Amino acid sequence: MWATRITKNLLSQTRIGAGVSALARGLPTASGPSISSVFSTGTSIGASQTRSASTLQPRRRKYKKAQKGRVPVRTGGSTKGNYMAFGEYGLRVKEGIRLSANTISAIHTMLRRKLKSIKDLKIWLRVFPDIPVTTKGTEVRMGKGKGAFDYWACRVAKDKIIFEIKGTGLNAEMAKESMRQAGFKIGVASEFVVANEQTRQPKKSDLPPTTIPFMHAK
């Protein structure tokens, strides 16, 4: 009897070893497909992921909450983000505002629907909501910590371009009408911008020379 049990154990080990070797070689077995066929249908680990307009939020943050802050007021003459960089037509805000991710997504969706007949339409988003905004209920007493997370937002300074569009067959009339409707969703005064020599970023050679900073008297 003991000899029969040893023989059965040896046969089972031999079958298991043969199945493992077949899986390692990528051959199909009686129990199912091979390892190579299973993993060939999946996505590679290093594959890049595309972020859609419905997921306008940063991938990671050091802290999950942030202070409220204020919309920046440029008193030093900064013009960052005020020039056209990618498209032919753009939308510029004339007042400082804090835009939420839902507002930006709504404008992006409206532009795609309004200009769906344009071939090779491209929409550039010049701002990104990366600031977490928290809220607390009404008639809540002071204390008990900061409120819970509500939505993502971004602070947009005055005269900054937030959207740019470009496409084959896109004329100024269609672009102006679409940007006019987009301005209704912002809530502040906006301006339609056309890319030209005055609205594009000037070259460093065309900029005036830097001035010597003021030195306090000793």
Image (cartoon, helix red, strand yellow):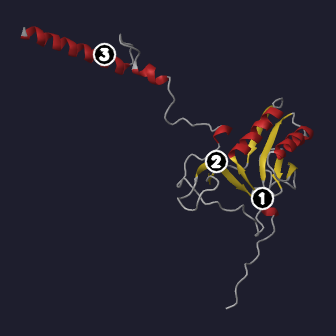
Image check: 180 left or right of 151?
right
Q: Quadrant of residue 166?
A: top right
Q: Quadrant of residue 22?
A: top left
Image check: 77 left or right of 147?
right
Q: Position of residue 100 (x, y in %)?
A: 70, 48
Say which residue label 1 marks.
96
Image check: 132 left or right of 202?
left
Q: Nearer the viewer, mark 3 or mark 2?
A: 2
Q: Nearer the viewer, residue 6 or 96?
A: 96
Residue type at mark 2 is Tyr
The crowding category of the residue bearing disc 3, from other C-alpha atoms within 10 Å (few below 14, some 14 to 19, many at least 20), is: some
Q: Position of residue 134 (x, y in %)?
A: 61, 53
Residue type at mark 1 is Gly
Q: Label 3: state its secondary structure.
A: helix
N-terminal of the two: label 3 or label 1?
A: 3
Question: Decide: marks 3, 1 in contact (CB < 8 A)?
Answer: no
Residue closest to the far right: 173
Say which residue label 2 marks.
151
N-terminal of the two: label 2 or label 1?
A: 1
Q: Nearer the viewer, mark 3 or mark 1?
A: 1
Residue type at mark 3 is Gly
N-terminal of the two: label 3 or label 2?
A: 3
Write the residue at 83% across / 34% down: 114
Which numbered marker is on residue 51? Answer: none
Q: Label 1: state its secondary structure.
A: loop
The crowding category of the residue bearing disc 1, from other C-alpha atoms within 10 Å (few below 14, some 14 to 19, many at least 20), is: some
Q: Nearer the viewer, residue 166 or 155?
A: 155
Say which residue label 3 marks.
19
Question: Residue 177, relative to residue 195: is it above or below?
Answer: above
Q: Nearer the viewer, residue 66 or 22?
A: 66
Write the residue at 78% across / 55% down: 160
Q: Label 2: state its secondary structure.
A: strand
